[in-house]
Amino acid sequence: MRAGLTRRMLVASGLLALVVSAAFAVLLLSIADLRASERSAFHSEEVLVAANRLERLIVDVEAGERGYLITGQNSSLDLWRSGQAAFPQQAQTLEQLVTDNPGQLALAQQIQRDATSYLRDYSIPLVDAARRDLVAARTPAAVDEGVRRIDAIRVGFDQFMAAEQNLAAARQTRSDTAAHRAIVAAAAGLGGSVVLVVLFAGYLSRAIVRPVRQAAGMAGRLAGGDLGARLPEHGAAEIGVLERSFNTMAGSLQASRAELAASRARIVAAGDQARRRIERDLHDGIQQRLVSLSLELRAVEATAPPEVRERLSEIAGEMAEATDDLRELSRGIHPAILSEGGLRPALRALARRSVVPVELDVDLPARPPEQIEVAAYYVISEALTNTVKHAHASVARIDVRAEDGALHLSVHDDGVGGAAPGHGSGLVGLTDRVQALGGTVAITSPDGEGTTLLVELPTARHDQPS
Ligand SMILES: Nc1ncnc2c1ncn2[C@@H]1O[C@H](COP(=O)(O)OP(=O)(O)O)[C@@H](O)[C@H]1O
Ligand SMILES: [Mg+2]
């Protein structure tokens, strides 16, 4: 059992949703990464600011101490004191900022130790000594030691800041990579989704839209009477079922129409045969008897006494009229001349007897199949009767020719027009007879402009009634 349409659609939609959400997941992860990198870049900046501030405090302490040693003025010690006071707090801030990085924490602690030692073991004792005796405290050894200690602290700060800048640079690189990845993920997701949507649309169009359009086209052809129309049967799932059902339906319609046409043709043929038989029976039976009775009567009349001879002559005359009437009647039932001589002489006889003058043009290289010949005769006979009965025409024109595997009949009059099947039984019966043979009828009869009847009877098919 192949998958149904619903399942196919679900699978295709699920696939699309999967690709789109995977692309979005990668995008979201990359954005989160990017934000983390940004945060750590900001953190590095904070660390550098804190380290700068701390260094500035040490520099202040050293400058205040040196100023006092040179000038001996107490005001120089303000900077020295405020630097010392702020130092522990600022040193702690810096350490807290780098607790998550052991390398930087060790460097910061080293700086703090060096600076604390500088304050406790050098700067405070030196200032105390200078307060007691300024000149004695200003020894070159003391100055050298100060320079050495400050240089060591500076070196510490330089190391710390260089390391922090390296960290910041590494973080920047990571953040650039994350941003790049986010862009690639977004582009790939977008591109992938577009490709999938296009593929999906293509699949929908091929698997559903096109077959449905074909089915609609076929339904239109069926509705228009083309029962031979069929669909290709390679659709998937329910579409395939639809195509097969459509074809089966068209096949049944076609078969029943063919059956109907065959049965109509059989009915018409049976009617024609019956008429021919009646005509033969009349001709060979009653007509012959009437003729021999007339001859006998004429013989009796010749030898009869004069007083009955006149009466016998009258009776013989009426018998001749009755024989003529019977001949006319049997011709109407089926003209013997048609079976014997074909359409041309039969139509000629018809035209001769017509009250309205007839121009006749028959162009037939050979006799058409019997059924077609009989149908053509009755069609023209009915049309001509209508012209005489309804048209008030001055002339009728009849054309018969064989062309492209069909017999083409045309009966035209210049009468009043307005012919319409359904107002009587003649045109309807004529149409039935033609359609039973697979032919077509077209009646053009505008008021006041005469009437034209065009009939096509296919001669290639229906050679013999079944
Ligand atoms: N050649 C014609 N000229 C004018 N009117 C016609 C002609 N043929 C048919 N008609 C009209 O069409 C109607 C239908 O014709 P038909 O089916 O042969 O029936 P009907 O038995 O009346 O002849 C006629 O009653 C007549 O009014
Ligand atoms: Mg009629």
Image (cartoon, rainbow, N blue to C red):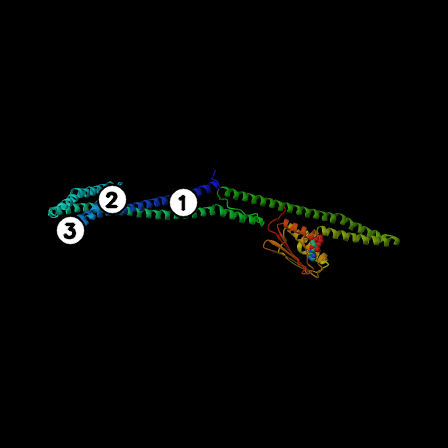
Q: Position of residue 267 (x, y in %)?
A: 66, 46
**Horizontal arrangement in the rendering, residue 365 relative to residue 17 (left or right):** right
Between residue 403 and residue 178, name the one nearer to us: 178
Circles 1 and 2: CB distance less than 8 Å?
A: no
Between residue 157 and residue 93, name the one nearer to us: 93
Between residue 138 and residue 305, name the one nearer to us: 138
Query: Around disc 3, counting alpha carbons within 10 Å, would you say few (fewer than 14), some (14 to 19), or many (20 or more)?
Result: few
Amino acid of disc 2: Gln
Asked if the beta carbon under badge 3 is closer than 8 A to the nearest atom of ligand 1, the reply is: no
Disc number for residue 20: 1
Q: Residue drawn at (62%, 45%), measured in percent from left and top?
A: 260
Which residue is labeled 2 in the image?
A: 90
Between residue 246 and residue 75, name the one nearer to us: 75
Ligand 1, seen in the image, is in the quarter at bottom right
Q: Position of residue 27 (x, y in %)?
A: 36, 45
Label 3 secondary element: helix
Distance, label 1 to label 3, CA atoms, is 76 Å
- In front: label 1 or label 3: 3
Amino acid of disc 1: Val
Q: Position of residue 378 (x, y in %)?
A: 68, 52
Query: Around disc 2, counting alpha carbons within 10 Å, would you say few (fewer than 14), some (14 to 19), or many (20 or more)?
Result: some
Residue lying at the far top in this picture: please name it: 1
Query: Around disc 1, counting alpha carbons within 10 Å, would you say few (fewer than 14), some (14 to 19), or many (20 or more)?
Result: some
Could you tell which of marks 1 and 2 lies nearer the N-terminus?
1
Which residue is labeled 3 in the image?
A: 71
**Horizontal arrangement in the rendering, residue 195 relative to residue 398 (left or right):** left
- In front: label 1 or label 2: 2
Amino acid of disc 3: Thr
